[in-house]
Amino acid sequence: MLTMEDIIRDGHPTLRKVASEVAMPPSEEDKQTLSSLIEYVINSQNNEIASQYGLRPGIGLAAPQINISKRMIAVHLTDDKGILYSYALFNPKIISHSVEKAYLQSGEGCLSVDEAIPGLVPRHARVTVKGINLAGEEVKLRLKGLPAICFQHEIDHLNGVMFYDHIDKHDPLLPIEGATVIER
């Protein structure tokens, strides 16, 4: 089981690398890595397990965050309608996105970043993501709101991009014109 000790911190070189594609069909080792990512995210949201193992709660985790530079992400969250988005994907890609922007009113956080970094993170309001699940099936997801933001955050990790790279350096809290504000 993954713990906070397995998650590398901001400044580690792996977080700035572009991760490599996972060969299909995935190896047992790759399947195990992806399974452990989704297991961490689910366990981190369970108060009992999280306190027992000292897990910081998260809604997403990417393989580079555990120092494995491969294109794998796990996301486990509910949207504003209470719909559960629980996905572990190999080689996820954003295949289309809206022009319209959105951002989390509270800003974004990251399991690899220990301090809070204030600022608004512009994201696409809607994205379509394609990837391969643990069963080897292609998954195509049309996302908006918090799920869209979370998938963009995790896919950024696969490209060596941190959430704070998107924040306006001169005025981090400047509202993003025409963007949808998402409360969490």
Image: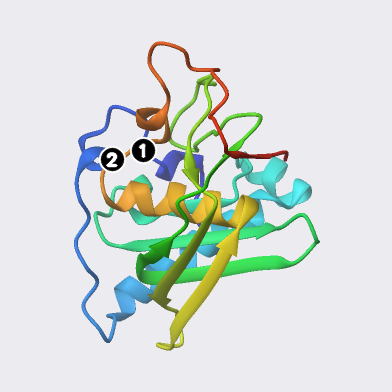
Q: Residue at x 51, y 48 (%)?
A: 100
Find disc 1 in the rendering and name its residue. Answer: 8
Q: Is residue 159 above or below residue 16?
A: below
| Image point (74%, 52%), residue name | 46
Q: Residue at x 26, y 60 (%)?
A: 70
Element marked by disc 1:
loop
* The quarter of the displayed image where residue 95 is located: bottom left
Q: Position of residue 167 (x, y in %)?
A: 42, 25
Position of residue 168 measured from the top left corner of the image (x, y, whole percent): 41, 21
Q: The residue under label 2 is which amino acid type?
A: Leu
Q: Where 14 sits versus 168, above or below? A: below
Residue 39 in view here: no
Pointers 1 and 2 in contact (CB under 8 A)? yes
Relative horizontal placement of residue 141, taking residue 145 as reference (left or right): left
Residue that protrudes farthest toward the front in the picture = 178
Instruction: Answer with left or right where residue 19 lies relative to residue 44.
Output: left
Q: CA distance from mark 1 to mark 2?
A: 8 Å
Mark 1 belongs to which amino acid? Ile
Q: Which residue is mark 2?
A: 15
* Residue toward you, 46 or 134: 134
Image coords of residue 165 (percent x, y): 35, 30
